[in-house]
Amino acid sequence: MINLEPRIYLASRSPRRRELLTQIGVRFELLMFRGIPREDPDVDETVLPQESPEDYVVRVTLAKAQAGMRRIRERHLIPHPVLAADTTVETDGHVIGKPEHEADAVAILQRLSGRTHRVLTAVAIADFERVESLLSISEVRFRALEQEEIRRYVASGEPLDKAGAYGIQGRAAIFVEEIKGSYTGIMGLPLYETALLLRRFCYPI
């Protein structure tokens, strides 16, 4: 009798999420999109009218997990649970996603300079029977940033694929004066919540 090791699918292109799952010993396979676009065409990431940042990030994450299950069916893949996550930044009640271009990244960082903002990361796991999610909310305070250091940081290319136009695990670590909450949640995958969900889906961790 063959004893197959437990495994999940990760429905994300994020190298940070891959690194964090590896850190806690989770075995996974990437469930990638077939098309060129970075976003899944099945998932609408537009913020809906009157939608709170909390509702937004949970909705998008659940949609990503469910889209992953559809891909498993369509491709006739070996069934494993699908893990998905989504991160957004909120300030003044507004959702701040990934910058569209360098000028947008500069404007976002200017907005965050010298202020506290919230980082919301939802994680969801789905199988053929159910889908569940948990939400991690952290606060990050930036010191006042100089225009030249914002320019240099944006020129590095690091902020262009990250919610809020920065990565706390990268060069932007020097911007951070204080955090309250989950460091791994700010990175993009809150490991406490992830482990809780994995256990609910009988993954041994």
Image (cartoon, helix red, strand yellow):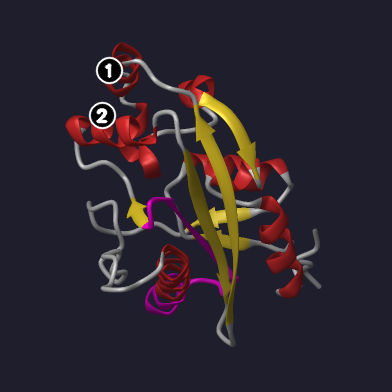
Quadrant the C terminus occupies: bottom right
Q: Nearer the viewer, residue 72 or 52?
A: 52
Residue 129 appears at what percent x and percent y?
A: 59, 87
Range of residues picked out in magenta = 68-93
Q: Which of 2 and 174 is in front in this view?
A: 174
Residue depicted at x 45% and y 35%: 115
Q: In this view, does 57 lie above or below 187?
A: below
Q: Residue flagged by tag 1: what amino acid is it? A: Arg
Q: In this view, does 118 lie above or below 2?
A: above
Quadrant the N terminus occupies: bottom right
- Left or right: residue 76 compared with residue 141: left
Kindly indicate whether the residue at mark 1 contacts the one at mark 2 (C-beta within 8 angstroms).
yes
The CA span between labels 2 and 1 is 7 Å
Residue depicted at x 53% and y 34%: 141
Residue depicted at x 21% and y 36%: 104
Residue 106: numbered disc: 2
Residue 110 on the magenta span: no
Q: Mark 1 highlights which residue?
A: 151
Q: Is mark 1 on a helix, strand or loop?
A: helix
Residue at the extreme bottom of the image, as rendered = 129
Q: Which of 83 and 116 is in front in this view?
A: 116
Residue 19 appears at what percent x and percent y?
A: 59, 40
Q: Residue flagged by tag 2: what amino acid is it? A: Val
